[in-house]
Image: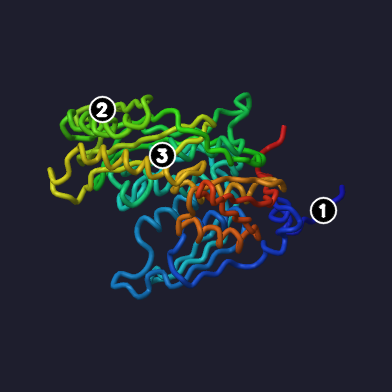
Amino acid sequence: LILCRIHPTQHILDSFSRRHYRFLMSTLRYDDGAILFRQRIITSLLSRRVLLVKNIRSDDNDPGLRDYEASFLRLIESLTNGTSIEINETGTQFRMKPGTIVNGTLEFDCSVSRGVGWYLEGIVGIGWAGKRDLNLTLRGVTDGCEKEECSADFVKNSMMPILKRFGVGVEEDESPPPMLRVNRRGAAPLGEGEVEFFCPMAKSLSPIDMTNPGKIKKVRGTAISCKVPPTSPSRSAHSAKGVLHKLIPDVWIHTDAHSRSKAGPGGCGPSPGLKVILTCESTTKMVMTAETCMDPEAERGSVLPEDLGVEAATMLLEEIRKGGCVDTASQSLALLLMCLCPEDVSRIRIGSLSRYTIASLRLFKEVFGVTMKVTADNDTKTVLLSCLGTGFKNWSKKVT
């Protein structure tokens, strides 16, 4: 019998190529509070580097972590094995020692201070890197927070295709593709909605070449209502089509009205809500999504359903005007997955870099040592980004 002692960091180093070893041993320290809160946590998990965040709203009248941030940390702790999270008494500092992403089947109650989409945005980037397939059920607010963050419908229409582009779930003989389904609607502020998210595990990602945005060929959308007159989503859909039909004939916007009295998939939570989500697809299979909703804090009747439809159509046209192959809210996810690709060149065309994306690029360079090559295309007014991946591999996946 021969015994072999493996160094505790060997599993971490095996997940990345040798040229990125020097970035994987030091602690990630940040003194600027809760900036890029979810991104820092998921990059800490993927790189297996200890994360230390200080000065979280230390100058506010109500200092420390918010309830939804603490809830996200509990969710991460539930999805992993061996993760240790220490929070000081005031909540202005926390230290996370990452463990192994395990996934599996999990049900979780989210804080109603943020929508379910806020949680999904952070989980989508690590769902494929677990030991098992992820089957996650989240309960909380599904609609009504679109002014501040993405909804579950946005994650489904915009981010699920990006995962498939990187090769997650493309081999259907092994496992089904990524899937997100809203089982029950729950508008802000009380929520009571339910979302089911499935993501298969993958050994590694595939490099991408998303540089040809193509021409827009169709627009699909849904006007969704909870506890409001069923004519409201029809009015929103009609006004949105009135704007889009001036530019493209293939426009279909469905209505989805929900009532509190219904149980199961047709029911909703106790709060009223109205939203419009639109997705366009190009001749090269690129998708862009835009959405808007009724402000839950506004007086009832202050915003007409027709205004929401026009606003959603205008937001989608603005995304199309910017150009590129992904919408603004999905830029950081695509760039994160590019950093984790094999040691091959990945390229993507983006309309214009948002401030959040620029901050994410700086974070990825610090954590993974990946420097994006940014080239401005003056002819199309877009930006072309390319990088060499770190060669990340999911060694937790069982090989048969």
- Residue nearest the viewer, comparing 303 with 140: 303
The residues bearing labels 3 and 2 have C-alpha atoms spaced at a distance of 29 Å
- Do labels 2 and 1 touch, CB within 8 Å? no
Quadrant position of residue 255: top left
Single out the mark in the foreground, 2 or 1: 2
- Kindly identify which residue carries mark 2: 263
Task: Residue at 32% x, 72% y: name it.
Answer: 60
- Residue nearest the viewer, comparing 347 with 101: 347
Q: Closer to the N terminus: mark 3 or mark 2?
A: 2
- Residue nearest the viewer, comparing 175 with 357: 357
Q: Is residue 372 left or right of residue 116?
A: right
The residues bearing labels 1 and 3 have C-alpha atoms spaced at a distance of 52 Å
Crowd rating for badge 1 (residues with CA inside 10 Å; few <14, some 14–19, many 20+): few
- Kindly identify which residue carries mark 1: 4
Task: Residue at 63% x, 28% y: name it.
Answer: 171
Q: How many marks?
A: 3
Q: Is residue 10 left or right of residue 295?
A: right
User: Which image quarter is the C terminus in?
Assistant: top right
- Do labels 3 and 2 touch, CB within 8 Å? no
Q: Is residue 257 left or right of residue 323?
A: left
x and y percentages locating residue 100 in the rendered image: 60, 50
Single out the mark in the foreground, 3 or 2: 3
| Amino acid at circle 3 | Thr
Q: Residue furthest bottom?
A: 59
Q: Is residue 345 left or right of residue 189?
A: right
- Kindly identify which residue carries mark 3: 289
x and y percentages locating residue 267 in the rendered image: 26, 30
The residues bearing labels 2 and 1 have C-alpha atoms spaced at a distance of 58 Å
